[in-house]
Image (cartoon, helix red, strand yellow):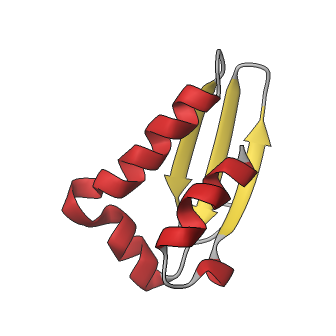
């Protein structure tokens, strides 16, 4: 799944070397978190997220029976519950 997302995203962003993807796979779910350069994030989310939604649709079709989810994140922080 990671290779598919890279294949779709890297050619259309201005900073392909900044694309980072973290994958968590389960029996029924594949979760991908992606970090891109700030300018590229704006481009992917432009036009109400049309480009990012297209990548998600392709990923979902490729996942078969599993549910695939692609999130654009700022960082891969494990501690979201910091108090």
Q: Nearer the viewer, residue 62 or 73?
A: 62
Q: How many numbered markers are drawn?
A: 0
Q: From what the image shows, is residue 53 above or below residue 62? A: below
Please indicate whether residue 3 sits to the left or right of residue 82 in the image. Answer: right
Q: Quadrant of residue 76?
A: bottom right
What is the x, y in percent for residue 33?
Answer: 62, 55
Q: Quadrant of the N terminus?
A: top right
The residue located at (26%, 66%) in the rendering is: 46
Q: From what the image shows, is residue 63 above or below residue 77? A: above
Specify whether residue 68 is in view.
Answer: yes
The residue located at (78%, 28%) in the rendering is: 26
Please indicate whether residue 69 sits to the left or right of residue 23 in the image. Answer: left
Q: Quadrant of the C terminus?
A: bottom right
The residue located at (61%, 78%) in the rendering is: 16
What is the x, y in percent for residue 48?
Answer: 22, 56
What is the x, y in percent for residue 32?
Answer: 65, 48
What is the x, y in percent for residue 6?
Answer: 65, 60
Specify whether residue 78 is in view.
Answer: no
The residue located at (54%, 31%) in the rendering is: 60
Q: Nearer the viewer, residue 54 or 83?
A: 54
Please indicate whether residue 56 sits to the left or right of residue 82 in the image. Answer: left
Q: Nearer the viewer, residue 49 or 12?
A: 12
Q: Quadrant of residue 74?
A: bottom right
Q: Nearer the viewer, residue 26 or 13?
A: 13
């Amino acid at each position: 799944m990671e290779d598919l997302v890279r294949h779709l995203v890297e050619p259309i962003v201005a900073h392909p070397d900044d694309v980072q993807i973290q994958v968590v796979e389960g029996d029924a779910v594949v979760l991908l978190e992606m970090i891109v350069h700030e300018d590229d994030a704006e481009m992917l989310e432009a036009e109400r997220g049309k480009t990012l939604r297209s990548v998600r649709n392709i990923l979902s079709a490729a996942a078969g029976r599993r549910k695939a989810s692609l999130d654009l994140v700022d960082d891969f922080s494990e501690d979201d519950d910091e108090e």
